[in-house]
Image (cartoon, rainbow, N blue to C red):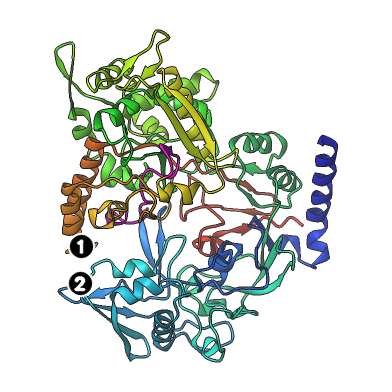
């Protein structure tokens, strides 16, 4: 088996080494990045609800949305839109002002006709993405001139524009003059595709392994060109290496400019390729601008996870330093709140809430005093772990918190024990926990089948922590992790503990909204949660927070206060357990291209699979090597 794997790897390596010559791409003018194997290689119609691998370059270099969320900059980029959405006083009308001077790659100008037609055809066809959202709210859509679109809403909705803000998914404009000529927009494969972004399709592999994009001659007539200048690479190749080993070998041989290995593979690259580097040039290397918080979703519709004391006991049974050491050798950034500890949210929420966290108490006493569960020195302890592993870390506490987070919850198994005992739990003679009815307490953690990534690593670290505490824990890996989580077929799931935050905007309505009681679904019905927070938890105070947010423009300063109040409710109730921010591991090879958006110059979110990647390309600098 090992011999076969080596042979297979060598075959893939040969293909990668020879690929640029086979397709006559000048390597010094080509950026090669990892991509998925396309399931429908000839189909570029991503405007339908069926998954069409948009991250093969379609969303990254071919399409422009109206607005793009940019977490590293902490802002919303006006892409095809010239300015932010304009609402009337009661949020029953939204106006879109389009950027002038933008053209489809076939020379037709992008105008209000494209937007009006696109929304109309989306509403008429149930198989189009955003069909349900538009039909729920849109009363009428029309233009007042070639660059102004008016959307009249059936009811007030201060967040309707969120459907158009690209944060790894949004309604994106498509060309009216192309789609109006086809009989069925759902079966139309949109091949060759017409581009609104700076690149056009050059070629693709019929087997789905690669897709090549070529820079438009009129790149300056796209939002990318207008906002950021000319993209430097003439070509962008998205290549699926199937196995991480193949991607590592490709980068060692300078045939992969951007890879996303696991932490072990990243270490191999640092040792084998002097041109490879991470987001940070030193430990802990990882990306800290990814707007996703990882952790554990507890099924609040199942006993005993419907008890707040039990949820807090499980939290206090975790030593976060040991936990992150197990999961990522200490390189992940801890997050005590239900939003990621990225620099933007550290400034907006973590730092302003630090004093509240320090003074927060549980209704239990320890040695005659109320118990304060927050540990503001957890990051310092994690830094000490890193030092013990031989890594260099800063001495300044503020610098340490920038790297490892502001704090987490105390490791307090004695307090966790008190919380359980007062709810009727007890230990057997072997120290194992029993439920109040005398049955052994067994927790099954639902995980995915991948052996890498934060979901798997959270499952492994959690199981070890809770077993140490005396709970019988097993991990059940399932390819249907998301589906089973949404249906409630779990005790504890490693689906995200909260809906992903915007990342570049302070509004937390996106995080809280799925917890509104109006969206509650019993076990067996799909939770309204996408992939985050399928916890089946609701709370009247949280309902009030969400309702109040929906009356406000998302830029209203009051939203920040409401966001903090909502986060406090989540801390008090702990329906899910956030652990650490998404520890993105990326490796850039600087042999052909430099000036990637690393931590020393975070001008854009650094991933190649995000739609923002097109905005990175104008900043890259060729080294001149061939």
| Residue 125 drawn at (x, y percent) | 45, 80
Q: Which residues are magenta?
A: 489-510
Rendered residue at 28%/40% (across/down): 350
Q: Is residue 505 magenta?
A: yes
* Left/right of residue 246 with respect to residue 615 in the rendered view: right
Q: Among all residues in the image, which is located at the extreme top?
A: 429
Residue to which mark 1 is pinned: 550
| x and y percentages locating residue 373 in the rendered image | 25, 25
For image coordinates 16% across by 55% down, the residue present is 558
Alpha carbon distance from label 2 to label 1: 8 Å
Q: Is residue 156 visible?
A: yes
First-in-chain label (2 vs 1) = 2
Q: Quadrant of the C terminus?
A: bottom right
x and y percentages locating residue 452 in the rendered image: 58, 39
Tell me the residue at 41%/50% (across/down): 487
Q: Residues within 10 Å of mark 1 (few under 14, many from 20)?
A: some
Name the quadrant of the N terminus: top right
Name the secondary structure under disc 1.
loop
Q: Residue at x 60, y 65 (%)?
A: 57
Mark 2 residue crowding within 10 angstroms, few (<14) / some (14–19) / many (20+): some
User: Would you say the residues marked 2 and 1 are in contact, meaning their CB atoms lie under 8 Å apart?
Assistant: yes
Residue 393 visible in rendering: no
Q: Is residue 59 on the magenta stretch?
A: no
Camera-side residue: 276 or 520?
520
The rendered magenta stretch, by its main secondary structure, is classed as: loop
Q: Who is closer to the viewer here, 344 or 11?
A: 11
| Secondary element at tag 2 | loop
User: Which label is found at residue 156?
Assistant: 2
The x, y position of residue 13, in whole percent, is: 80, 49
């Amino acid at each position: 088996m090992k011999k076969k794997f080596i042979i297979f790897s060598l075959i893939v390596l040969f293909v990668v080494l020879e690929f640029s010559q086979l397709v006559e791409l000048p390597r010094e003018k080509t950026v090669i990045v990892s991509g998925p194997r396309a399931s429908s290689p000839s189909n570029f119609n991503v405007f339908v609800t069926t998954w069409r691998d948009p991250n093969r370059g379609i969303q990254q270099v071919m399409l422009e949305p109206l607005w793009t969320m940019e977490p590293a900059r902490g802002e919303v980029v006006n892409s095809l839109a010239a300015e932010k959405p304009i609402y009337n006083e009661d949020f029953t009308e939204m106006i879109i002002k389009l950027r002038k001077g933008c053209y489809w790659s076939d020379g037709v100008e992008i105008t209000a006709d494209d937007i009006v037609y696109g929304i109309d055809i989306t509403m008429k066809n149930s198989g189009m993405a955003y069909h349900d959202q538009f039909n729920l709210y849109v009363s009428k859509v029309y233009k007042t001139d070639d660059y102004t679109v008016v959307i009249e809403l059936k009811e007030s909705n201060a967040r309707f524009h969120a459907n158009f803000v690209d944060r790894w998914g949004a309604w994106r404009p498509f060309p009216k003059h192309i789609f109006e000529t086809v009989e069925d927009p759902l079966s139309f494969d949109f091949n060759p595709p017409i581009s609104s972004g700076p690149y056009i399709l050059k070629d693709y592999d019929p087997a789905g392994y690669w897709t090549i994009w070529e820079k438009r001659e009129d790149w300056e007539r796209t939002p990318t060109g207008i906002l950021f200048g000319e993209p430097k690479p003439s070509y962008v190749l998205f290549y699926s290496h199937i196995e991480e080993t193949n991607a590592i070998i490709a980068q060692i041989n300078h045939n992969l400019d951007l890879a996303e290995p696991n932490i072990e593979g990243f270490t191999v690259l640092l040792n084998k390729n002097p041109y490879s580097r991470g987001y940070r040039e030193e430990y802990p290397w990882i990306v800290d601008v990814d707007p996703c918080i990882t952790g554990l979703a507890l099924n609040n519709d199942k006993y005993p996870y419907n008890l707040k004391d039990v949820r807090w006991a499980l939290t206090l049974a975790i030593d976060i330093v040991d936990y992150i050491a197990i999961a990522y050798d200490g390189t992940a950034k801890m997050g005590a709140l239900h939003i990621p500890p990225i620099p933007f949210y550290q400034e907006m929420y973590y730092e302003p809430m630090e004093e509240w966290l320090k003074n927060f108490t549980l209704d239990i006493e320890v040695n005659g005093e109320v118990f304060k569960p927050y540990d503001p020195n957890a990051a310092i302890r994690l830094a000490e772990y890193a030092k013990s592993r031989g890594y260099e870390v800063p001495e300044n506490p503020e610098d340490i918190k920038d790297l490892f987070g502001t704090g987490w919850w105390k490791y307090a198994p004695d307090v966790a024990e008190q919380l359980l005992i007062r709810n009727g739990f007890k230990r057997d003679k072997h120290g194992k926990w029993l439920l109040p009815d005398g049955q052994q307490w067994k927790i099954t953690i639902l995980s995915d089948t991948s052996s890498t990534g934060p979901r798997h690593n959270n499952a492994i670290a959690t199981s070890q922590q809770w077993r140490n505490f005396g709970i019988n824990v097993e991990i059940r890996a399932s390819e249907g992790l998301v589906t089973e989580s949404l249906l409630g077929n779990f005790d504890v799931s490693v689906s995200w503990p909260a809906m992903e935050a915007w990342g570049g905007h302070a509004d937390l309505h996106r995080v809280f909204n799925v917890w509104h009681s109006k969206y509650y679904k019993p076990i067996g019905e799909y939770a309204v949660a996408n992939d985050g927070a399928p916890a089946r938890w609701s709370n009247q105070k949280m309902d009030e927070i969400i309702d109040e947010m929906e009356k406000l423009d998302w830029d209203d300063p009051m939203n920040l206060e409401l966001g903090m109040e909502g986060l406090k409710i989540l801390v008090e109730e702990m329906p899910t357990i956030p652990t650490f921010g998404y520890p993105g591991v990326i490796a850039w090879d600087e042999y052909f291209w430099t000036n990637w958006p690393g931590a020393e110059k975070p001008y854009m979110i650094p991933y190649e699979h995000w739609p923002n990647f097109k905005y990175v390309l104008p900043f890259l600098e060729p080294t001149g090597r061939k």
